[in-house]
Every structure is written in structure tokens, then in C-alpha cells.
Image: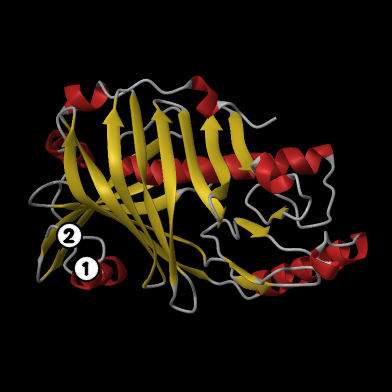
Amino acid sequence: MAIKGCGSLLAAAVLAGIAATGTGIDAQATDADKVITAARQALGGEGKIDAVKTVSVVGRTTRTRPDGTSSESEFELSIELPDKYMRRDVLAAMGPTSVYRNTGFNGDGLINLTDVPPSLSAGGNIRVAMIGPGSAPPGVTLTPEQKADLDKRTMAGFKQEFTRLSLGMFISSFKAYPIQFKYGGQAESADGKADILDVTGETGFTGRLFLDAATHLPLMFSWMDKEPLVMTVGGPGAGRGATMMGGGGGVQTFVQGGGGRSGGAPSKEEIEKMQQEMTDRMKEAEAKRQTVEYRLFYADYKTYDGVKLPTRIQQMVAGKATQETTFDRVKVNGKIDPKKFEPTK
């Protein structure tokens, strides 16, 4: 029942059938600990997995837009177990220079930073607006209490993101975000069987982890959440409109280049009008969001320092592929610069 690759529609269809219908649920008294032990052995063994302290990844993410087009960008991933996680994505590429976004956590310290190079911001015509997670609507000033609550929810979202990824790597519970496992039966399809682990954690975290009954490797994690918030924003002074997408927690970020009047920087009135438009469209899009199923597929396992790690991960939302991540370079137990995990001030 191995996935031939995250892009395989056949594999996706097989697992979609398992997740959606739960066909062939086996009531045998199989213990969750037995499934976890077999999976960790398949990943390299308890000793090898427990010896992993750091994981560094450089790769590419391909995102599919609502109109069917796609875009590819580089990303960097740094993990220092048990409680440090940082992902750095290219937010916007403008010629040879890029705007980056760093997200993650260092213990209880939040990492949530948009990094605009001086060469782009010096001219005054680059506007970066954060549209969640971890940001207030454009033009809205939060009280200290509201900011603290927003940071708490944003932190929970990043820790859940880390947990979904780490389940395909280690099938472990870390102090950064403790989780519990319960055996959920066995699912069957024409292609084989999968053991199911029901996973729960803090702040309402729930989901189902599917593991190949033959190889014992993780196949997929599924969960329910609000569908991505998608909206198109333009406005006065904008060089171009942009479609913004986000999964689970909402739209992520919006970067707009270009000038306003006669190619210069937008006026205060133009900026305020654009912010109001963004806020109105965000409210309209939020009101239409429904709860749907998300699926994260783990595939193309390769061995690094004695431990098998997935090197291709695909996300599907409501049955449609939305994102595919490829790990091009992976290093286990290498030294990571502590500055990568500096919390945002």
C-alpha cells in the first residue's frame, strides 16, 4: 500500500476512500502501543529515533491556486527537539530579491516574522500586510490582552503544524505539544490495509494517523478544520492584485509591490482605502468558510543517519491537492545556528 509519490492520483484516491468511508474497520484488539512500536522500528528503531536531536531541511513547495495555476518557492525547515521549530518560506520573489516569512516557536516563544530586505523596503513602495495567522486585520490596533490572546492561538497553530509533520517522522509525543494515541481499528481497500491511530492533544487538536499495515510506515494524517480563506485583493496604488490562501487558520500573508500615483508611493488615503477593502473582503470570505477534511500524505521515505524520513509531503483539502512539499537536502543531527530560533520581539 505504499504511495508511489505524493502526486499519484491513484494513491490519493485509495487513501481518500479509506479516510472518508472507513471501509473494513477491523475490531481486533490491537493495542496502540504495538502499532507505534512497529512503526518506530520501521523508521529506524527506538534507539536511532531517540538519538535524533536536530533536523535541517531545504526544499521546494508547490502551491496550487483556486484557478488551477501553481507556483513554486523554496523553503527552509529547522527542528531542534524537543521544543524548537522554525520554517522560513519565500513570501514573494521580486527579481533577484525575495521577501521571507519565518514561523514557528522556541519553547513558549513565538516566531512570526516577515523579513523584508532593506533593498526592497528602502524605496518606500513595498507594502506588506499580514492577514493572519498571528496578525490583526489591516488598520486594527489590538489591546495588550487581545494581542496576547492572538499570540496564544497563533502559537497553538504552529505547534499543531509541527505535530502533523513530526508524526510522519517520529510518531512521538514531544513536550512542545504533548499528544495521546488511541487505536482506531484497521481500514481496508483493494490496495491493502492500514492501521489507524486516533490522535488528540491540547486546544482541541484531533486527527487520525494511517499507517501501512505491511511496512508500518506512516501514510497519511487527516483532520477536520475550516477550509482555507481565499480572497482576491487589489486596490488603489496596487501594482497588481493578489490571491491569498491559507489552511486551517486562515490567510497567511499578502505582499504587494508597485506604486501609487504616477508610480510613486501610495498616499495615506489610498492605503486606508486598500486596508478597508481587505478587511471587508476578509469578513465576507470568513462568513462563507465551511469545515472540511484536510489530508497530509507522507511519501518517498529515505534514510538519513539511520532514520527514515518522508521527503515528499502532499496536502489535500476537501479532496483537492493544494500543496506539495519536496525535501531536496536533509541533514540529521547537524548544528543549527541558535539565531534561527530567536522569538519575534
Query: Residue beneath label 1, please?
Result: 8
Is residue 265 found left or right of 103 in the rendered image?
Answer: right
**Contact (Cβ within 8 Å) of mark 1 with mark 2:** yes
Across and down, in percent, residue 144 comes to: 82, 37
Q: Residue at x 38, y 73 (%)?
A: 320
Q: Is residue 201 visible?
A: no
Q: Nearer the viewer, residue 140 or 256?
A: 256
Tell me which residue sits at (79%, 71%) in the image: 277
Residue type, numbered disc 1? Ser
Give the residue type that dot 2 points to: Ile
User: Which residue corresponds to the image point at 43% horizontal and 46% vertical from the top-left?
Assistant: 75
Kindly indicate the quadrant of the structure image that contains residue 48: top left
Mark earlier in primary sequence (1, 2): 2
Q: In x, y percent, where is residue 57?
A: 35, 38
- Label 1 and label 2: CA atoms lie apart by 7 Å
The image shows residue 210, relative to residue 341, as above or below, that is below
Residue 193, percent across and down? 12, 60
SS state under label 2 = loop
Q: Is residue 138 visible?
A: yes
Q: Which residue is mark 2?
A: 3
